[in-house]
Amino acid sequence: MRGRAFKAAAAAVMGAALSIAPAGAQIGVGDVETATEELERAAENAAAQNTVDPWEGFNRRSFHVYLFLDETILVPAAKAYRAVTPKKGRKGIRNFLDNAQSPVVLVNDILQGEFKRAGDTLGRFVINSTIGFGGFADPAGRMGIPKHTEDFGQTLAVWGVPSGPFLMLPIFGPTTLRDGVGLGVDVAIDPLFHVETQAANRARYSRFVATAVSRREPLIEPLDDIQEKSLDYYASLRSFYLQARKREIANGRTSYEDLPDIGEYEEFDGLE
Amino acid sequence: MDKTRLNVPRRIVLAAALFAAALLAVPASADQAAEAFVASILDEANLVFQNPDKEARKESIEDLVDKYVDMRRVGLFALGQYARVITDEQKAAYLPLFRKYATTIYHDLLEDYSGQRLAVTGSIDRTARDIIVNSQAVDARPGDPLAGVVIHWRVYRDREGRQAIVDAGADGVWLAIEQQSQFKSVIANNGGGTTGIDALIAELRKQTGG
């Protein structure tokens, strides 16, 4: 199951990164600048403490809440969802939710100066929203325009903002200070966020719930497996998240430069 | 026979071979020897993946891991800075438990590929002795979530030129790094130092059922 688990870890990252936040998060675009400055200061502090997880105490308490909600609400919902829908239908729903997220991805593509990818996102949105039945099908993918995701946390990373301390949030799961702020900004970027009618409200909350369930469903077994096999589930998820997120920010390019040395224990060879 | 005298020409040959390899490797930062090493392991693994008997498959995969993965090095790496404080006694208890634990994890990673074939797709040398070899499932069923996943193998070449696997990963997520994160956390949260290492050993014993 580990291969799938890896894939799952990567998917979980995308899930956390995408704006699955409800309308509740009240972050205005004007606050972003101050937030960025604060972020940089916090990140410096974290670096000074020489650890990725200076807030471990808070994070672990928050992880208990996350696990409780996951086990009592999200997983049963995901299992029910799996029981009543065919596989193809779930794929369609995933496509639809991803397509609805396209405006946010597009803005972040542009903010990152990735204009070719911005073109991909726009093209996919137009094609899939029309001949893709509102986004349920993915004809753009079959035409050779691959799906990708972006979020404001990644944009901040591209702009050189350090990740800051690791952050475990109830409901949202693993993230970092930078990416948590990004999550809020992505909510503000979303056009639907600015429509204030009852219908829009309902749409927002339905989408939040649907996205959470749809993303959790394929992860039922992989996350179970990781939990069962780990000595410290929290530390395990933290590592999977931080590793997969790094690659996500690099748009899928794997960096081998920052890997820790494994050969540094050479001196032990001489001991025996 | 005199050991030192035997060693001298071997070292020269090895140095010459490495020098030649370095010259050959100019255009791409790839490492033929490491790629060949992983390719031969995957040849063996691919045979194992075809075996329909799950139990037999498990045993064969464990044999492969035993033969090609340098568990001692990985186990010490997984301890992070605590590798410098672990006592000999603790090491004697820890290393076999780690081997058991990590072998299960490797088995789980590879078991997903039963019925498929993995092939080497290229390599990147971080240093002359630290090489990453990439592989991917060939002829994966369309729509299989594993189809696009790159499985990385980290090959370490010791001073004698012997090669061994020291880490495996998928799409930029590495096993030993995740294990180190867990182990350091267990040790630190149980008093650190040798006390923490005792707690880690107890946890590993519980997890591996041995």
Image (cartoon, rainbow, N blue to C red):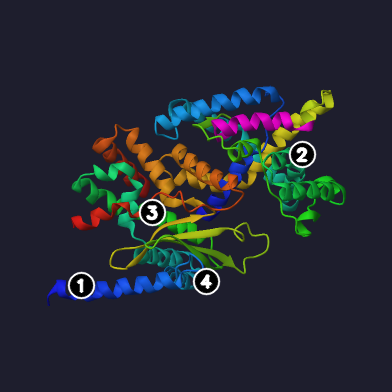
Kindly identify the amino acid type of the residue bearing the numbered disc 2: Pro
Give me the residue at 19% from left, 55% from top: A271
| Residue B171 in the image, given as x and y percentages of width and height | 54, 54
Element at label 4: helix
Element at label 1: helix
Labelled disc at residue B50 = 4
Query: Is residue A263 shown left or right of residue B122?
Result: left
Question: Which stretch did the figure color magenta?
Answer: A172-191
Location of mark 2 (residue)? A103
* Mark 4 nearby-residue class (10 Å; few <14, some 14–19, many ≥20): some
Give me the residue at 48% from left, 66% from top: B30
Element at label 2: helix
* Mark 2 nearby-residue class (10 Å; few <14, some 14–19, many ≥20): some
Element at label 3: helix
| Residue A60 in the image, given as x and y percentages of width and height | 46, 29
Q: Earlier in the sequence, mark 1 or mark 4?
A: 1
Asked whether the residues under the numbered discs 1 and 2 touch, taking CB atoms below 8 Å apart as contact, a structural biologist would say no
Q: Nearer the viewer, residue A45 or B143?
A: A45
Kindly identify the amino acid type of the residue bearing the numbered disc 4: Gln
Q: What is the spatial separation of the Cα atoms under label 4 and label 3, in whole angstroms?
A: 23 Å
Residue A177's quadrant in the figure?
top right
Query: Is residue A109 shown left or right of residue B16?
Result: right
Query: Is residue B197 visible in this depiction of the protein?
Result: yes
Residue B1's quadrant in the figure?
bottom left
Chain letter belonging to callout 3 = B
| Residue A166 in the image, given as x and y percentages of width and height | 50, 33
Q: Earlier in the sequence, mark 4 or mark 3?
A: 4
Location of mark 3 (residue)? B102
Kindly identify the amino acid type of the residue bearing the numbered disc 3: Ala
> Same subunit under labels 3 and 2?
no
Location of mark 1 (residue)? B7
Magenta residues: mostly which secondary structure? helix
